Amino acid sequence: MTRKREAYHSGHTPKFMVVVDDSPECDRAIVFAARRASRTGHRLQMLAVVEPKIGDGQALFGVADVMRAEAHADARAKLDAAADRAMKLVGVEPELVVREGTLAEAIIAQIEDDPDVSILILAAGAGKDGPGPLVSGLARTAGSYPIPVAIVPGQLSDEEIEALA
């Protein structure tokens, strides 16, 4: 069951959620979401997802724990860099979240857990390879999301995004 959205109720503040990853288009989503949050008074939430990559034999001798800790540290470093970008751009201090699981499951879980998340903002790749793995993967399930999904064209410059956001 989908948790009721409360973003615009008394005592709540709507949040734009951005997924932070290694893709080149991720920066376009960050710039759009930060500018939009700054102009509308919304909050900005950045989500990094640690996907399980542990094989059967790696659970021995604490290898799995070390790999998990390294993946969390890497996710946190990506979030810190993205947060720094938003702060320098428009002075918005985002909420940083790390979740474990598959990308689609983690996004849905975060939306379910936080009733103030009102829009998921993604960016499409600008290359000839299509919209990128995040947008391609989520396009199959976006229709079932309990919130709107905004997709920023990846070829937009900072100036073009500023004019739109």
Image (cartoon, rainbow, N blue to C red):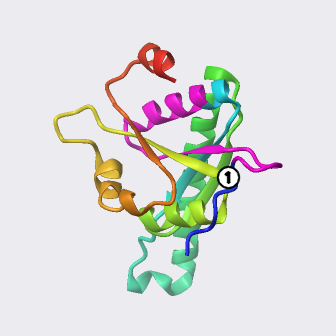
Q: Which residue ends up furthest to the left in the rendered image?
A: 128
Q: Residue at x 52, y 34 (%)?
A: 30
Number of marks in picture: 1
Q: Position of residue 89 (x, y in %)?
A: 61, 21
Q: Is residue 19 visible?
A: no
- Looking at the image, residue 65 lies above or below residue 156: below
Residue 54 lies in quadrant: bottom left
Q: Which residues are magenta?
A: 8-36
Q: Residue at x 51, y 64 (%)?
A: 108
Residue 53 on the magenta segment: no
Q: Residue at x 68, y 36 (%)?
A: 42
Residue 19 on the magenta segment: yes
Residue 52 lies in quadrant: bottom left
- Looking at the image, residue 99 lies above or below residue 150: below
- Looking at the image, residue 157 lies above or below residue 27: above
Residue bearing the label numbered 1: 116
Q: Which residue ends up furthest to the front in the rendered image?
A: 9
Q: As shown in the figure, which amino acid type bears the numbered disc 1?
A: Asp
Q: What is the quadrant of the N terminus in the image?
A: bottom right
Q: Position of residue 77 (x, y in %)?
A: 59, 45
Mark 1: secondary structure: loop
Q: Which residue ends up furthest to the right in the rendered image?
A: 11
Question: Going by the image, does 36 lie left or right of 27?
Answer: right
Question: Going by the image, does 141 lie left or right of 117?
Answer: left
Q: Position of residue 116 (x, y in %)?
A: 67, 52
